[in-house]
Amino acid sequence: MNKQFPELHQFLGAYFHQDWMVEHETAEQVIDAFLADSDLEDLVAIRGEISALLNLGKDEVELRGYLLRELSCYYCYWNVWESGMCWMQHIVDRLAERLDRS
C-alpha cells in the first residue's frame, strides 16, 4: 500500500487494475463506475491526493513509472492523453463535477 497516497492507490489499483478492460470498454467507463460506487468523502480525498501528486513536479517518465509501480495503475493513458498530468487533471475535473452536483 502506498503510504503517501493511500486513497489514490486504492482507486487506481482497484479500478485500473491489470484486467480493467475485461470489465469496461473505456477508461471513462472506469471513472464513471468509481464515481457511482464512491461516497463524497472518498472523492474529496482522492482529489486532494491527485493534486498533491501533481504538485510534486514529477516529469512524465517519473509520473508514468510512479503510477504503475507505486500506485498500481495499469491504464496506458499515453495512448489517449498528452501526458499523465493531463490525465490526472481530467480525473480531478471529473471528481469536481460530481462533487459540485452534490
Image (cartoon, rainbow, N blue to C red):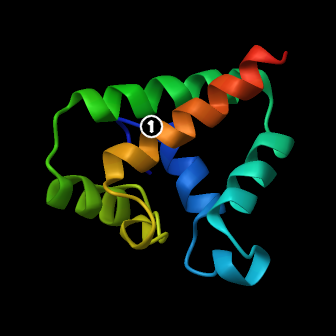
Residue depicted at 77% across the width and 50% down the height: 32
Residue depicted at 47% across the width and 71% down the height: 74
In the figure, 27 relative to 7: above or below?
below
Residue 89, quarter of the rendered image: top left
* For residue 96, side relative to residue 56 (left or right): right
Residue depicted at 69% across the width and 51% down the height: 31
In the figure, 23 relative to 46: above or below?
below
| Image position, residue 82 (x, y; %) | 33, 57
Residue depicted at 73% across the width and 76% down the height: 25
Residue 28, quarter of the rendered image: bottom right
Residue 2 appearing in the image? no
Which element is circle 1 on? helix
* For residue 84, side relative to residue 74 (left or right): left
State the residue in front, 97 or 3: 97
In the figure, 35 relative to 63: above or below?
above
| Image position, residue 55 (x, y; %) | 25, 27
Tell me the residue that label 1 is attached to: 89
What kind of residue is marked 1?
Gln
In the figure, 42 relative to 6: above or below?
above
